[in-house]
Image (cartoon, rainbow, N blue to C red):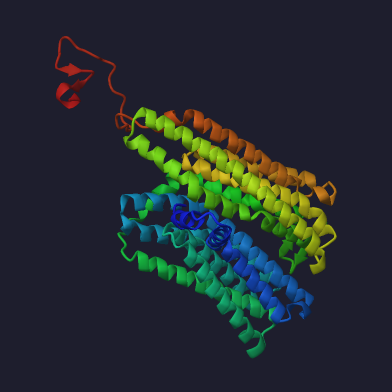
Amino acid sequence: MAGIGIKLNKIFGKETVTTNLIGFGYSTMVTVAPMFVVIGNILLMSYFLRYDVTGYKGRNLFAATILYIFIFSLLAAAPYNAVISRYLSDVIYDETYDDILPCYYTGLAVTILTACLMGIPFCIWECVVGKVALYYVFTGFCGYIALVLVFYSMLYLSICKDYSKISIFFFLGMLAAFLLSFLFVKGFHFEVSYGMLLALTIGFALTAIMELATIRRYFHRNNNSYKKVLGYFKRYWKLIVINFCYTLGLYVHNFVFWHTELRMVVANSFVMAPVYDVATCIAMFTNISATVIFIARIEMHFHDRYKAYSEAVTGGRWMDVQNTKNRMFRQLSSELMNLVRLQFIISVVIFLLMLIFLPRFGFAGLVLQIYPSLAAGYFILFIMYSEIILLYYYNDLDGAVITSAAFCLVTFLVSIFATRLTPIWYGLGVIVGSLTGFIIAYLRLRWVEKHLDEHIFCRGTLFPTKLSKKPSTLVYDRRNPNVNGGVDEKMMS
């Protein structure tokens, strides 16, 4: 995450209201802007193509397809991102840049294989049982794979610190999708929902192609060391578990409510709960700024303290190590508290605005009853994720695994219980699950603080270890003093 820190320091360093607004806008652009670009493009296409007056069946099929494309493309791509990020960090540190393309191709193969294992059976079911036209199913599947490629390639551009290019590529891809939707609907007279789906698929594909072209421009040499990459997947399997559990936890409560009286089944294939899903989306937007604030403050403040501690460990006095460690953890506590305070203020303001303006856009009734508890849950959730990132800093993978697994499991179980409550408590699963993960992560950070010296200085080995036959217990043979324990002294030396 050390890519935007210098830029943010230059912007916020002037300490004026204008520069603070510019800094917040810049950090927003390089973190969450792509999501807003996609959503904005879908809304614009819907408005100008008169999507609201099309057939009810076509609208539901399009909405369900887009929902599934986004959810399951994240579930397919997210689990491997942390392992690949760790591998790329080591490669960049060692300056062995020829290892990056093998990593890209290996990770791409694993990700696409996972996506196909998830997507192909569903598409067969959709076509055979749901009686959806083959061309529509194929277009949706292509859009799903294209978005998987987009999410996967974004990681490499982030490692290259090209955050702004990610937003630019999304903007260009969605601009092309917007123009193509008019061509398909007005020029070729495609049905509106299919024209929009085809245009979005092409837009995602163009975004993925631009990302791949940028990666190939940076890294054009390949040493074909694919086994080295696969070794990282085996070595850091905990990272896969962490990302999968966290991403699944984001949507597992939706899956629970997809099987309640709120459910709607489209084409005997897609199951969703539109009211609950809309409330979830609004709640996520209410708290999404926590991601921006966290990245900005970590880049500007905590990263420097962490770097100073690392430098003291590698070449400083014991007093320097202790002083920098204390300053680092004081900064960590300060940043977490500042994040909670700032996000609380922002969330309250956005919450009140949502209560005022959502009814004017047709979002009222049950959506507004479900929304408050989900908004509270996502507030805690994003704070919890910030703690998981901090656990990554200290290589506490066990703590991150426990946190993400507990978050996912508790969210699932409490969401099942919440289905029996009144709608205002439907988000209880997210609240309790996120709070459980937050508490566990906080306790693990405190544990890391107390045991950091042991973790840093006592984890290595003085002698290399290997699996072999147990040596003899004989220490000294007076009849043959040149042999000690069955091992020749020359070999011992």
Q: Residue furthest bottom?
A: 187
Is there any visible trace of residue 240 in the rendered image? yes
Residue depicted at 62% across the width and 51% down the height: 248
Residue depicted at 63% across the width and 73% down the height: 41
Q: Is residue 444 left or right of residue 105?
A: right
Q: Nearer the viewer, residue 489 or 178?
A: 178
- Looking at the image, is 39 positioned above or below residue 419? below
Q: Is residue 286 left or right of residue 440?
A: right
Q: Is residue 428 left or right of residue 183?
A: right
Q: Is residue 493 left or right of residue 191?
A: left
Q: Nearer the viewer, residue 341 or 389?
A: 341
In terms of image quadrants, where is residue 189? Answer: bottom right
Percent of width and height locating residue 271: 73, 61
In terms of image quadrants, where is residue 133? Answer: bottom right
In terms of image quadrants, where is residue 387? Answer: top right
Q: Residue furthest top?
A: 478
Percent of width and height locating residue 335: 56, 43
Residue depicted at 85% across the width and 49% down the height: 422
- Looking at the image, is 140 positioned above or below residue 225? below
Work out which quarter of the rendered image holds the C terminus and state it.
top left
- Looking at the image, is 169 positioned above or below residue 233? below
Is there any visible trace of residue 262 in the rendered image? no
Q: Nearer the viewer, residue 60 or 353?
A: 353
Residue depicted at 40% across the width and 40% down the height: 308
Percent of width and height locating residue 35: 60, 64
Percent of width and height locating residue 485: 23, 18
